[in-house]
Amino acid sequence: MKRMGMIFRAKANQALDRAEDPRETLDYSYQKQLELLQKVRRGVADVATSRKRLELQLNGLQGQSTKLEDQGRKALALGREDLAREALSRRAALQQQVSDLETQHTTLQGEEEKLTLAAQRLQSKVDAFRTKKETIKATYTAAQAQTRIGEAFSGISEEMGDVGMAIQRAEDKTAQLQARAGAIDELLASGALDDQSGLAKDDIAAELDRISGGSDVELELQRMKTELAGGSSSSQQAIEGGSGDKQEDTPPTKFDKQ
């Protein structure tokens, strides 16, 4: 079972490695980073919204506190100390709420600043990753194209391998047909096979044709030699005849006797 599990994991890893495209993996990682950046930005927006709501509540409480203070002064001016005391008590309660809200506002403001800084850093990382991603994708595409060109030139690619095998099969079949045709011609010439068309001759007729063909060549060669020899003799006789005529036409030289 352990060996089967190991084999299964090895096969699965090999299959995943063949199916994995680094460019798709990089694009998926970049998409996930964009989603994370979007979540951080939404968090910053939510914290800023909460902070703004606290600021509105603080403004409202501070307005009520100012109003109660004015009411206490008017009550004292009218001699109603009891009303002035009640107004001041309510103002004190509001001041406690204002103090609590200011503490919460300070906390939210700090969280907002942290999230804003984190979003800015994450944005910088995402931008850098995008640049690196595009560079790696371009390099991978160029290397892949170069590898395919090299495999095509060397003939080790799958497509070129199929073409090479097809050419090899065609050459083998052509050689086989040529060998078979030559063997059939030899068998027909030797008489081992009969020509059903009736155009082929038997071995005796073929041998007579060969001998007669050779004799014809010898006879033609002998005739040409005879013609050349006869032409040479005629030329020689013509030359000699011309010389004799010249000697007959020349008068004898006379010498004077003293």
Image (cartoon, rainbow, N blue to C red):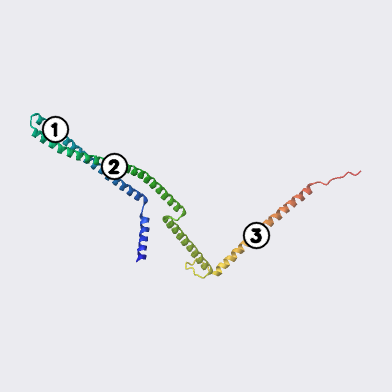
As helix, strand or loop, the secondary structure at mark 2 comes to helix
Circle 3 sits on which residue?
A: 223
Quadrant location of residue 254?
top right
What whole-number distance in Å separates the C-alpha atoms at marks 1 and 3? 156 Å
For residue 109, side relative to residue 220 (left or right): left
Circle 1 sits on which residue?
A: 69
As helix, strand or loop, the secondary structure at mark 3 comes to helix
Identify the residue at horizontal 73%, vertical 53% (top origin): 236
Quadrant location of residue 255?
top right
Identify the residue at horizontal 43%, vertical 57% (top origin): 161
At which x and y percent is residue 1?
34, 66
Circle 2 sits on which residue?
A: 114
Q: Nearer the viewer, residue 92 or 171?
A: 92
At which x and y percent is residue 200?
51, 66
As helix, strand or loop, the secondary structure at mark 1 comes to helix
Q: Residues within 10 Å of mark 1 (few under 14, many from 20)?
A: some
